[in-house]
Amino acid sequence: MFITRLISGILLLAIVIGAIIAGEGIVFLLTAVLSIIGLYELYRTYHIHKNVLGIAGYAAAVMYILLIWYDMPQTGILGICIAFLILMCIYVFAFPKYNINEIAFALFGILYVPVMLMHLYQIRRLSDGFFMIWLVFISAWGNDTCAYCVGMLIGKHKMAPALSPKKSVEGAVGGIAGAVILGAVYGHFMGEQLVSLTSPVLQCAIICGICSLIAIVGDLCASAIKRNQNIKDFGTLIPGHGGVLDRFDSILLTAPAVYFLAIYLGSVL
């Protein structure tokens, strides 16, 4: 299992790195595909992945993704409103076939997966997006790696035993500290390329510190959904890791956080 997990993890990392290097178009394509797969995995946990609610959700996700591609993120809220209206029509005219919980979950899925994940592409489109996007993975996966190491060494106090019994407070602190250090080091070496940041070392450390905390919430959020739905993993697409949502759970919340911090932090500090 460890070898399988290691190999698939390396391949996944290679695909992500290759896509980022290849350019905005490839990042868009990869992010769009992951968004739809992730949405399918989420809908499957609530058994709406093949019915009209799922189809409406996929259509809304594609509409939102196209709005982002055509550089119209400001109209994204329009896409969400249209999706909500469609789901309300289904709810009303098919009543009582679908209950309000199913309707709410269908809308939640659109917000939780494609809307959040497409911020990866939006980061890549920034003037220094090629260098800024790595902060997402430093914050999420760097934090996860550091937290695991620290937790294994000195972890004693459980952080959220009901959601993730293996996570410790010590590991969480170590993960955040590790992400801050990695961010500062990254800012030191890539500062000249991060043109939107006025103090790259400090600002990268702040971004990674804040976003590593958000990454923890993202990871626990996915765990909470799985506990609610009584499943171990969202899927089996990535051997040893589970599905797209199992591997990108922390990225979902981290990507938009990095995007907005990258835009606004430079004007504050």
Image (cartoon, rainbow, N blue to C red):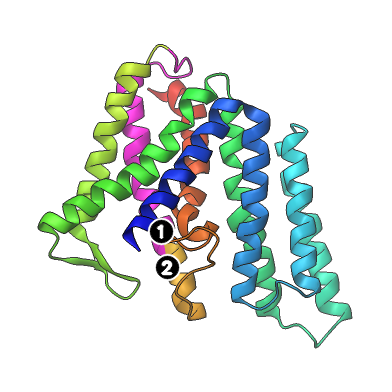
**Residue beneath the point at 67% across and 46% down:** 32
- Residue nearest the observer in this picture, 1 or 21: 1
Q: Point out residue 71 in the picture as x, y percentages from the top left corner.
A: 74, 31
Q: Is residue 198 magenta?
A: yes
Would residue 85 appear left or right of 99 to someone viewing this image?
right
Q: Secondary structure at mark 2?
A: helix
Kindly identify the amino acid type of the residue bearing the numbered disc 1: Asp
User: Residues in magenta?
Assistant: 193-220
Q: Residue 22 location in percent, x, y?
A: 60, 27
- Horizontal side of 83 relative to 238 (left or right) equals right
Q: Is residue 196 above or below residue 237?
A: above
**Residue 95 horizontal side relative to residue 17, left or right:** right
**Residue at (38, 34) in percent of width and height:** 207
Is residue 73 a member of the stretch shown in magenta? no
Residues packed near mark 2 inside 10 Å, few (<14), some (14 to 19) or many (20 plus): many
- Where's the N terminus, which quadrant? bottom left
Check disc 2 and report the residue beneath it. Answer: 223
Residue 98 is labelled as none
For label 1, the crowd category at 10 Å Cα-Cα, with few meaning under 14, some 14 to 19 and many 20 or more, is: many
The residue shown at (12%, 65%) is 156
Disc 1 marks which residue?
219
Amino acid beneath label 2:
Ser
